[in-house]
Amino acid sequence: MNMRFEPAHALSGELRPPADKSISHRAALLGAMSSEPVRIERYLHAADTTSTLDAVRALGALVEVNGEDVVVRGTGLREAREPDGVIDVGNAGTLLRLAPGWLAAQDGRTFTLDGDESIRRRPVERIVAPLEQMGARLIARDGRFAPLEVHGARLRAISYELDVASAQVKSCVLLAGLAADGATTVGEPERSRDHTERLLLRAGVAIHRNGRHVTVVNTDELALEPLRIPGDASSAAFLVAAGVLVPGSRLLICDVGVNWTRTGFFRILRRMRGIVLGDLEEESGELCAEEPVSDLDVAHGALEATVVEADEVPLAIDELPLVALLGCFAEGETVVHGAQELRLKESDRIAGVVEGLRGLGADIEATDDGFAVRGGGGLRGGTIDAHGDHRMAMVGAVAGLASREGVEVIGMDAADVSYPGFAEDVARLCS
Ligand code: S3P
């Protein structure tokens, strides 16, 4: 479905973004790994996280959906059922990378995960390597891609250093570590989102952080009290960007998760002199079980260019295409370094954002590990192809609101993966 976004006059009003996608996936999986029912309030009902509910059902969990809320009655840590067929992860990379951590520990059972065309291009060798070291056997197409077969085994604990900061790979190893004999440690080159660690701590697991290393110890059971999923900072980021870019705008985005490992984009935006008021969590070396929330008060204002370095990249990974968009309107040159992982997302987001924004009039070029934008001239408008990628579709929509002539987004329905109703929410803020 294609959709046109006309230049907006000013956005105003209050809005609660959809529930956090990363935390919803994890809550459903941990619910399935628990033996007692887990109540999840404000679960994200979007394509990706519905794939996770379907997957845990296939693995033997009972799932009840009551409006926004979900109750998962799990099988326990070591009792996942071997499904009759393939587990369809749809477009959900997080499900593809996290679920095998649990499944690798199901001794004597085999599971096959597969998904859509885009999922079949996402690398899985990054989880195959640690899970094989732990004693499971995994078979990926060409050694790298889905379909992925996981042959569960009794696992041994390992110490594993990630070569790239990836919350998905870190989480996969930690989930496997719950059922491995001994203490499993994962080291990451830079800090990445820590929702898995917070939820495990909340579930009573012995989990410790020491700098860039996290250790979990073998566990019998998870015990999760009801949880409420905060608004998704990544989804909120699109509304925030629209508010900052469109002259005359003033928005209140409510109930946004402000875990510091997710708020890199808001900090980058503040550095660009964007007006985003809110109570962002401070960086901390300590593990905590809470997911803090805040309202974000956003107003239009002039922007200045900035440089994003590698250590900031994992904290803003899904919002970097938006940094490129902001860069088109900022005075000076905005550069992102150390973001080669963007090439491995739902689409190649370096190529997509550079070609897409250039087609709308941006002065932008790709580098090996990011991009550079010379800004100040704004965007003319035109047509942008989302290439089936939800975040690129929403970048195109916000570009349209801030452009001089409007933008036609090819494949706007891709947004349903994380933000169903995005176009309606934008229309409400524009009226
Ligand atoms: C996610 C981690 C990130 C992010 C993705 C969601 C998660 O991926 O891009 O959208 O929920 O753990 P990587 O772990 O591959 O960086």
Image (tube, rainbow, N blue to C red):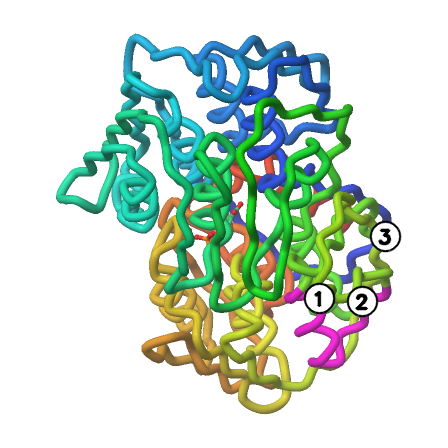
State the image coordinates of residue 289 (x, y, percent, origin top left).
75, 43
In this picture, residue 55 sits left or right of residue 378:
left
Residue on which disc 2 sits: 276
Q: Residue at x 84, y 52 (%)?
A: 294
Looking at numbered disc 1 in the image, what kind of residue is underneath it? Phe
Residue on which disc 3 sits: 295
Q: Are marks 1 and 2 in contact (CB under 8 Å)?
A: yes
C-alpha distance separating marks 2 and 3: 10 Å
Residue on which disc 1 sits: 266
Helix, strand, or loop for circle 3?
A: strand
Residue 326 within the magenta-colored segment of the rendering: no
Please state the extent of the stretch shown in magenta in the rendering. 264-277
Which quadrant of the view contains residue 428? top right
Q: Residue at x 31, y 26 (%)?
A: 153
Decide: is 238 above or below 87.
below
Q: Residue at x 41, y 60 (%)?
A: 161
Looking at numbered disc 2 in the image, what kind of residue is underneath it? Val
Looking at the picture, tell me which residue is in the foreground, 285 or 334.
285
Query: Is residue 98 shown to the viewer in this render?
Result: yes
Q: Is disc 1 surrounded by few (<14), some (14 to 19) or many (20+) residues within 10 Å?
A: many
Decide: is 115 above or below 107.
below
Decide: is 18 above or below 339.
above
Q: Are marks 2 and 3 in contact (CB under 8 Å)?
A: no
Helix, strand, or loop for circle 2?
A: strand
Decide: is 70 above or below 129.
above
Looking at numbered disc 3 in the image, what kind of residue is underneath it? Asp
User: Residue extending furthest front?
Assistant: 182
